[in-house]
Image: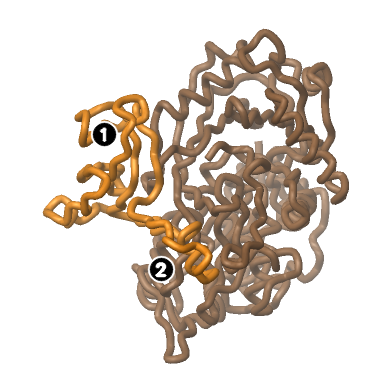
Chain colours: A orange, B brown
Amino acid sequence: MLLIECPYCGVRPELEFVYGGQAHVARPHDPAACSDEQWAEFLYWRENAKGVHAERWRHTHGCGRFFNALRDTTRDQFLATYRVGERPPAASSREREPQP
Amino acid sequence: MLVAIFDARHDLPPTYRLCHRDQTMQRFSGLSLLRRGLSGHRDWQPQWRKAEPKPAYDAVIVGGGGHGLGAAYYLAREHGLRSVAVLEKGWIGGGNTGRNTTIIRSNYLRDESAALYDHALKMWEGLSQELNYNVMFSPRGVMMLAHTVHDVQVFKRHVHANRANGVDNEWLTPEEARGVCPVLTTDGIRYPVLGAAFQGRGGTARHDAVAWGYARAADALGVDIIENCEVTGIRRDARGAVQALETSRGVIQARRIGVCAAGHSSVILRMAGVRLPLESYPLQALVSEPVKPIFPCVVMSNTIHAYISQSDKGELVIGAGTDAYTSYTQRGGLHISSHALEAICELFPMFRRMRMLRNWGGIVDVSPDRSPIIARTPVPGLYVNCGWGTGGFKATPGSAHLFAWTIAHDRPHPINAPFTIERFREGRLIDEAAAAAVAH
């Protein structure tokens, strides 16, 4: 089981959290104006990154709030967590090369 | 012991004996087993060559699991391609082919899916004879339990839809379900069993034997099976068409490339600039210590989530739901597999004291509608067979057969024509979230 740092509550076990998929996927302001490609991109196309992945989590059994995280999907290691509305930390943690 | 592994009831068609090698493939038969048994089994030849990569092939398949090896076999056998290679970054059958719970069934809801999965199921029925290799296909019946009113409605809908499509599936009362599987508990549990959908033609097969049988048969037709060969890049010409693969064992020219890379499909396709609507999740399974035959069928429960069967070796084979988050680690959270075991202990209290021997994870490529993609890509010469998610093993022969057809003809076979990448843009989804039966 993973330990995840909620930016509001601190480090808690994974069981308290729910995964919320890729982060920073903005819903189009005017869906009716989207092309089929743009709408499908919003609905179905995800990065599926092998390496650093920006993703949403919710501290369901804690403060209940959503936040974002950077996780290395080759190791399941959390590199950083940050609040909704903040930009993903681009600092050293993000530049760490994923190991094979 | 070998008698149990190799099936020799039927002769192969004569074309099968056309072999590129100076030495023809040793065929398995009752007589050959007896003869070699008497001489101490010392004169069996390796079942396939350890091929070195050549500079160029007519077609290259990326991924040496059942789907990829099968596709190479059908390219050589049914479409006459003489120069085919399978590239595998690890060892053949070491990915999801060797990590699944070997369940085979075709009781999917939609017309498109019923045609696809039943095509595969019909091929399973003759696969051991086709390959001269016993894949131990065992149509022992697959029972899917209903625990809620919603389950009952969904499964009855499946039963009716399947029958309209000529796919066997029947509704069982709890008493009838216990008749099929006497060790099942239907009452006195948190979610009592209200009934079950039962597909009698479904069952299991030996997963390793599927990879090995296809590898051996493909090799006999001249296919090069190249292990420890990881694809690192895809080269394209001025027109954009595929030209060559960069690999850990050098550059390999190929004008036709078929990708069967399961959880790594997104990674490989990205090398050619193609993005896929897939997400890769770990899916875990476990086996128990082996015991005497106790479990006569396959039982799946979507609602409390577990599925279970017993291998011919005696191990209980148990599957969990996918882990919550995307990952490429081939392992998952212990609480996910514990949850599956809790469900098993609820349904089968007699297994509470069984010890689990091993657990592991595979990386499954889940598509938004839980249906696969078997299609051309926007890049000429590049084909993809992916998105099988949690249920690819059951489709292995059909998927391989249709993918080979698609590569050979540069257009989809009518059965896989609906399973395109473009369906997600066109809104022609083939929603099998319920039939997939594994919690996502």
* A12 sits to left or right of B156: left
- Residue at 63% x, 38% y is B437
Q: Is residue B411 placed above or below B231 in the rendered structure?
A: below
Looking at the image, which is closer to me, B13 or B75?
B75
- Residue at 54% x, 55% y is B65
Which numbered disc covers residue A4? 1
Q: Is residue B276 placed above or below B240 in the rendered structure?
A: above
* Same chain? Circles 1 and 2: no
In this figure, which residue is indicated by the disc labeled 2? Answer: B270
Protein chain holding label 1:
A
Q: SS of the residue at dot 2?
A: helix
* B212 sits to left or right of B152: left
* Type of amino acid under label 2: Arg
Q: Quadrant of residue B3?
A: top right
Q: Is residue B253 placed above or below A52 in the rendered structure?
A: below
Q: Is residue B326 placed above or below B248 in the rendered structure?
A: above
Q: Quadrant of the N terminus of chain B?
A: top right
